[in-house]
Amino acid sequence: MDVRRAEARYPGGDAAAGVETRHAFSFGAHYDPGNLRFGALIACNEERLAPGAGFGEHPHSHTEIVTWVVAGELTHRDSAGHGTTVRPGDVQRLSSAGGVRHVERNDGTEPLVFVQMWLAPLDPGGDPSYEIVRGIADSTPYAVPEAGAMLHVRRLAPGERTAVPDAPHVYVHVVRGEVLLDGTELGPGDAARITDTKDTEAVGVTEVELLVWELA
């Protein structure tokens, strides 16, 4: 199990424009050849947007983009005609495939916090697609078959336990709270990269919210 602490993330964004980003993987000017990906996962960005701030229209291709809103509301628009507001508890996926452009903004009056995760597809190309699942439950895993991946949302009370999937690669990101993962305590923004997981469990220290990726 390889634990990466929140303070080790690469800083990014544009503070003057109200955008603060923390990257878990090699990104942009922060090139690290030893930290390019884990399984299919190639980015796990913590984003904070002030009211009125956002990312103007920009392109993506050959990437599965999954977004989890922590606080506030995210406005999404893309060149395929989709326009939605993503709220806490919703899972949003944009499959950029052969190419798509999109806009992400905080059009609300409160700060927006979200986690955005990028996965490499098994087969590049194809037509872009979009999906949003409102208020996903803990017991409902979210499949991204294009990347051979499954997202599990786990919300634990203090002392509550949950099994971590047995898989070749598992990535655990702590959204909020504190958790014991195989005996190691993790806090907000911390992550663990686990290879060949077997009989691993997470135990809530406080109330905690986890994003757990099961990666083939």
Image: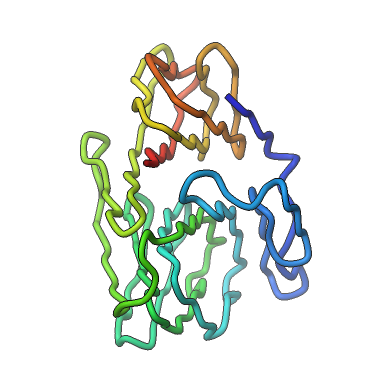
User: Does residue 162 appear to the left or right of 158 in the view shown?
Assistant: left
**Residue 202 falls in which quadrant of the image?**
top left
Residue 214: x, y in percent?
Answer: 37, 38
Classify 123 as above or below 141.
below
Question: Residue 165 at x, y = what percent?
Answer: 34, 27
Image quarter of residue 212: top left
Quarter of the rendering containing residue 126: bottom left
> Residue 1 vs residue 209: left or right?
right
**Residue at figure coordinates x 77%, y 59% from the top left:** 30
Q: Residue at 55% across / 52% down in the picture?
A: 44
Horizontally, is 214 left or right of 139 in the view?
Answer: right
Q: In which quarter of the image is the N terminus?
A: top right
Would you say 189 lies left or right of 7 here?
left
Q: Who's the residue at 66% across and 59% down the image?
A: 21
Looking at the image, which residue is at 56% across and 31% down? 192
In the rendered view, tell whether residue 203 sits above or below residue 50: above
Q: Nearer the viewer, residue 3 or 167?
A: 167
Coordinates of residue 155 in the picture (x, y in percent) = 37, 31
